[in-house]
Image (cartoon, rainbow, N blue to C red):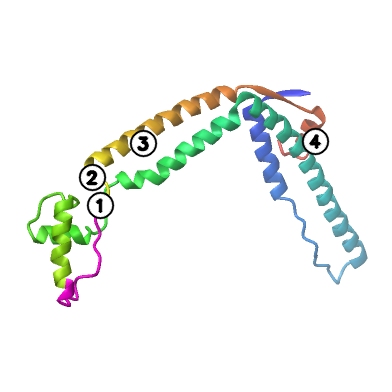
Amino acid sequence: MTEVTLHRAGRVLEAIRAAVGAIDLTATAKISIFGDPASELARKTAALEGEFAKLDRLLEVQARIRGVVGRSNVERGIADLLAKKAAAEEWIKLVSPLVTKPSGRPSALEVYSRRAGAAAEPTEATQLSATAAALRKRFEASDADVGASLETKLLDEAAINALKKRIGERRREIELLSARLRTANEGSVEIDDADIKYLTSIDVI
């Protein structure tokens, strides 16, 4: 058995995936009419059979290595750490746009509020009601520039700052999880010598 780090085992699995993806299982071939068609057909058929044999062996080796890596990941809690890290990253991805100032046009409410000389904060309940009432009159008067609804912000400055704080907390959580993952990946697993020899013989590793 050959002892390798979990990180190295992961690299081996990546190499195997690439090798599997490169296998040519094309079941048709062009045969020259100027040579010996029977011999060329036999050669290409044998080559295809060789690709099938290579695929079978690579998948067997991949399954064995995945097994030992998977067991080690469970024992070291790596799967749980990866799941927590992925969840935190997804949360940041979804929430970050809410605290980023949009670069597009201002909302209809903001535009109308500016024209009317309204308060600086258009999302306040009183200003929202006043603006809606004014726009409703224009809509009922068949003003073509006014629709039946208006856009407004749901998050005030305090809410946005609270979300920014939570994003910062999630980022720190990700840093801690990443550090724990690096430590966990310093562990090692054992790979069968025959598998290492085979992978080396076909230039996978």
| Mark positioned earlier in the residue sequence (2 or 3) | 2
> Which residue carries the number 3 mark?
167
| Mark positioned earlier in the residue sequence (3 or 4) | 3
Identify which residue, 146 or 31, lies in the foreground: 146
Does residue 140 show up magenta in the picture? yes
Real-space Cα separation, disc 2 to disc 4, in angstroms: 62 Å
> Which range of residues does the magenta coloring cover?
139-153
Real-space Cα separation, disc 2 to disc 3, in angstroms: 17 Å
Real-space Cα separation, disc 3 to disc 4, in angstroms: 47 Å
SS at badge 2:
loop
> Which residue carries the number 2 mark?
156
Q: Quadrant of residue 24?
A: bottom right
| Mark positioned earlier in the residue sequence (1 or 3) | 1
Query: Where does the image place residue 83, in percent across and percent down from the top left?
Result: 54, 35
Identify which residue, 2 or 125, lies in the foreground: 125
Q: Residue at x 52, y 24 (%)?
A: 180
Q: Give yes or no for contact between labels 1 and 2 (Cβ–Cβ under 8 Å).
A: yes
Q: Residue at x 22, y 42 (%)?
A: 157
SS at badge 4:
helix
| Mark positioned earlier in the residue sequence (1 or 4) | 1
Amino acid carrying label 4: it is Tyr
Residue ranking furthest to the bottom: 142
Q: Residue at x 40, y 33 (%)?
A: 170
Quarter the N terminus occupies: top right
Q: Give yes or no for contact between labels 1 and 4 (Cβ–Cβ under 8 Å).
A: no
Query: In the image, 165: left or right of 1?
Result: left
> Which residue carries the number 1 mark?
153
How many neighbours does mark 1 have within 10 angstroms: few (below 14), some (14-19), or many (20 or more)? few
Query: Where does the image place residue 185, in percent across and percent down from the top left?
Result: 59, 25
Q: Mark 2 or mark 3: which is in front?
A: 2
Amino acid carrying label 2: it is Asp
